[in-house]
Amino acid sequence: MAEIRLFRISDIHLGKRQYGSDIRRDGFVDTFERTIELAVERDVDAVIHTRDLFDDPVPPLPTVMRCADALEPLKERNIPFYGIVGNHGDDQWLDLLCRTNAVTRLN
């Protein structure tokens, strides 16, 4: 039986301004980008993100765009990114990212 390599991340909270700081907001996206790079480097079969991908139901557009850009290396290598929504009302953004064919939403 073939081994399946999954890379699971959770509660990234993109767009969060921890301590009210824009620098901290960038840190969350930087971490997400590095996490995707690690998944690509490790040649996983799929990435699963559980709970809150975004921190706010209306995240800043630059944050959504950076998220979409960060997912491109997965898409280029046909590594699926599965998202399971959390409780921060970010489901519409996950649905939008699904339209890029870089994300599949799991219920």
Image (cartoon, helix red, strand yellow):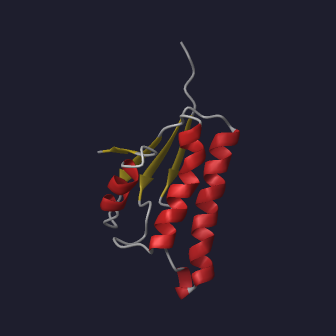
Residue positioned 44% across, 60% down in the render: 53
Give the farthest residue toward the top.
Answer: 1
Q: In x, y percent, where is residue 36?
A: 61, 50
Give the farthest residue toward the right.
Answer: 41
Residue 80 visible at all: yes
Q: In x, y percent, where is residue 63?
A: 50, 69
Give the farthest residue toward the bottom.
Answer: 20
Image height of 72 relative to 61, above or below: above
Residue 14 visible at all: no
Quarter assignment of residue 6: top right
Residue positioned 47% across, 60% down in the render: 11
Quadrant where the C terminus is found in the figure = top left
Image height of 65 relative to 41, above or below: below
Q: Nearer the viewer, residue 46 or 101?
A: 101
In the displayed structure, does residue 91 sit left or right of residue 74? left
Quarter assignment of residue 27: bottom right
Image height of 49 relative to 79, above or below: below
Residue positioned 55% across, 63% down in the render: 66
Q: In x, y percent, where is residue 65?
A: 50, 64
Residue positioned 54% across, 34% down in the render: 78
Q: How many marks?
A: 0
Image height of 68 relative to 81, above or below: below
Quarter assignment of residue 41: top right
